[in-house]
Image (tube, grey):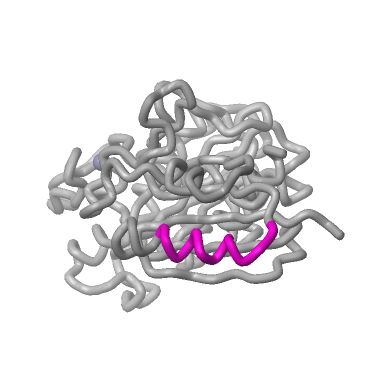
Amino acid sequence: MKKLYGGMEGGGTKFICAVGSGKDEIIEEVLFPTTTPGETLGQTIAFFQKYNVSAIGLAPFGPLDLNPASPTYGSITATPKPGWAGTNVVAAFQRIFDMPLAFELDVNAAAFGEYSLIPENRSLESLVYFTIGTGIGAGVIINGKVTHGLTHPEVGHMLLPHDLKKDPFPGTCPFHGDCFEGLASGPALARRWRKPAETFPDNHPAWEQEALYIAYALVNIILTLSPQRIVLGGGVMEHQLLFPSIRDKVRVLLNGYLASPVLTGTMEEFIVPPALGKRSGVLGALALAKSCV
Ligand code: ZN
């Protein structure tokens, strides 16, 4: 019998948990709403207890303490989400499960999933996965590994050019106002235009503006990390017309400066939707569990 592994992607609105031996062999996948740490972690622990798993990959929303040498390793740090700051996810699981526990930021797990489970990505050395939805974040894979640093990259909070004459909206980020997430997350779109983004028609001016902010962020990433592929996931990116518009704007902003044929071509294989759809995070968490035994 094949070994079983657990994967948990913990988002701000829901926790997705799966058990299986690999991405095409999932036995059960469930979803719990994110309420209080006690209730939601209790539900996820009870779910994994039903199975004889060999390791679990835990990938909650951040920011996280990912430093194994730190006394608060395993915890969610400065989140504005009520009740969750200081919650130690790893400690809660360690009390119940005597087995390897992988711990990673949700977007890093998604990046790892897109990278390690998709053969066309696996042949690359670098990839950046963005989620653009309720929040904005990105997982960075360099030389085949998830990048950490002092903490972990927080690409969603990078600062972008903001023309206040064209877009006087001050942004929604409680820390920075008009950072990338403050200008371009789903809640930012809804607050700026006073209705949810999924109700905007295809010709709504919000989409042009959104594509421009995303293109600014991608150009910054292309110029700093030179990734071989960029994957754009998350609820906002379900508006598929953003893709061609973002590629066009990236080309215009780079203005021919970089000589790679990837950047001067159509970029259809360079800026792509997630191959795993909405499951990059949970399948990536399971893949991380598998990689730690
Ligand atoms: Zn911010």
Q: Is residue 252 in view? A: no
User: Which residue is pictured at 65% across the width and 47% down the height?
Assistant: 55
Q: Quadrant of the C terminus?
A: top right
Read off the magenta span.
41-52
Q: Quadrant of the N terminus?
A: bottom right
Q: Is 51 on the left-hand or right-hand side of 103? A: right
Q: Is residue 51 in view? A: yes
Q: Is 289 on the left-hand or right-hand side of 191? A: right
Q: Main secondary structure of the magenta part?
A: helix
Image-quadrant location for residue 142 = top right
Image-quadrant location for residue 154 = top left
Q: Position of residue 67 (x, y in %)?
A: 45, 26
Q: Please check the rendered image and state whether residue 42 is part of the magenta-colored stretch, yes or no.
A: yes
Q: Please check the rendered image and state whether residue 152 is part of the magenta-colored stretch, yes or no.
A: no
User: Which residue is pictured at 38% across the width and 26% down the height?
Assistant: 71
In front of the other: 290 or 106: 290
The correct choice, above or below, for 178 with respect to 2 in the image is: above
Q: Position of residue 246 (x, y in %)?
A: 47, 52
The correct choice, above or below, for 21 with respect to 141 in the image is: below
Q: Position of residue 102 (x, y in %)?
A: 58, 41
Residue at the right extreme of this rendering: 1
The correct choice, above or below, for 137 with respect to 7 in the image is: above
In front of the other: 291 or 145: 291
Q: Position of residue 220 (x, y in %)?
A: 42, 33
